[in-house]
Amino acid sequence: MSDKVNRRNFMKTAGLATGVMAVASHIPFSYAQNSKVNVGCVGTGGQGSFHVRDGLSGATDIQIVAVTDVYGPHQKLGVQLARISNAKIYLDPGQQLTDAQKQKAMAAYKPQGYYDYRKMLESETLDAVIIATPLHTHYQIVMDALDAGKHVFCEKTMCYEIEQARDIVMKCHEKNLFVQVGHQRRYNPLYNKALMMVRQEGVIGRLNHIDAQWHRNNDWRRPINTDHVITPEEAPFIQDLEHHMNWRLYQATSRGLMTELATHQLDIAAWFLDCLPKRVYGCGGLDYWRDGREIDDNVNLIYEFELDQNSRGYYAINARSSYQDKVAINNPYSVRLMYSSITANAKKGCSELIEGDEGTLELTEEGSFYYQEPTSKVSWGGQGSGSPSAEQAATVVTSGGTLKLSNKAQQEGKPITVDNDKSVDQLQFIRFSEDIKNGGMPKANQIVGLNATIMAMSGFTAIAEKRTVEIDPAWYTFDFPTPDPGVVS
């Protein structure tokens, strides 16, 4: 790993002119013995600045050496946040510093700002690139970063064309690099715990249906600074601020709800079922926010998955009725995902219901619950026959976490809790740096990104063309080994 801001470089930058003493024992900074993973951040708008402020600042093995954004105010904010993040990983948490000392630290660890990411790739010594730019720009930036020999973190959706996503998978294979995609639920301990409960504990029995939705009640429009005059540096990249800031609302730069929201939850379905769907059909429209946008403000889809014994999501069952064919019940079977996203009612919020014949898991990023079916063999609190031992129960519900339960959950659901003191954004970037340093492969790898792209674009096409879309296995098949998209940690 490169270590651009090491002790010598810091002293050269800060020097005695900053008032920092040259005697090691008196320097108010502690330096890691191991080198940092040097990253360049491309895009520091809403999502990108969140990553810098939360995720990257909590991943102490990552150092931000450069920030790129084509919009000056976002670039300035990104540099400021990155400076704070960089200082945090070197400051000794046990030492009380004055405000002046903190300012000196932040000045020493100020990253370079760029308008053009290509100049950043040419000028900086980087191990990886973090991309949080509009969807239509992902493909070229990812490909250029891989060609430059950098690992990549790319916000979801990885691409908005299936062939582009396939190109990225092939480029990763060619360069022996990886792309981690921002499907952060794969790093959420609650989701990983839930998947282990399904696969290892069998607490919901056979997973036979999934309901998922992302419902909100707002226009999804970002405010525009009408006083901002596009500068000569911005002009090559920005034609007008409306389309630049609200790119999610236009067909040329986005696929709307399918790529900006749905892929998070489509990915969960593919992860839990360990396969891609066979087909999708659906409908949608622009029926409420008729304000000049070009993308649908509501979508409803059905995805059909077919499971067999080769899938980790397959679950054999015993006959529950004398009328059931004891052989046929364990032949390949179908599971359907019902998905909706709307923008004019928020009552149902955002969640995934993983439904089986013995129970249901209600998953959200804030908390998750188990709802038991009368047929369930799992007993909670020692009630009923066949109740598990304390050790067995501990693998189902891990103590130590705290959740504010809804009334419904208090009455019906059992909380799934885990011990964790970090945000999910921090966890995904901690794993990102670990995989770079240790030669690992991300859980949300380039195949996960490809699969989510396939599902999103198939759904988008089904709605746009008002037809059933059959998903071609050739879209996700390669003539070389590819990363496992079904890993659980």
Image (cartoon, rainbow, N blue to C red):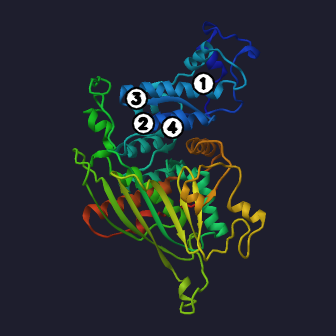
Return the mark for residue 46.
Answer: 2
Whole-angstrom CA distance, mark 1 to mark 2, is 22 Å
Where residue 68 sits, quadrant-wise, is top left
Amino acid type, label 1? Ala
Q: In terms of sequence position, does the residue under pointer 2 or pointer 4 come before the other?
A: 2
Q: Assess disc 4: are there few (<14), some (14-19) or many (≥20) residues with their C-alpha within 10 Å of its C-alpha.
A: many
Give SS at disc 4: helix
N-terminal-most mark, 3 or 1: 3
CA–CA distance in space, label 1 to label 4: 16 Å
Discs 1, 4 touching: Cβ within 8 Å: no
Task: Give the number of the disc on residue 74.
Answer: 3
Q: Say which residue label 1 marks.
A: 87
Are the residues at dot 3 and dot 4 in contact (C-beta closer than 8 Å)? Answer: no
* Disc 2 + disc 4, Cβ < 8 Å: no
Gap between marks 2 and 3, in whole Å?
A: 9 Å
Mark 1 or mark 2: which comes first in sequence?
2
Report x, y in % for residue 357.
56, 75
Provide the secondary structure element on which disc 1 rests.
helix
For the residue labelled by badge 2, is the local secondary structure a helix, a strand or a loop?
helix
For badge 3, the amino acid type reads: His
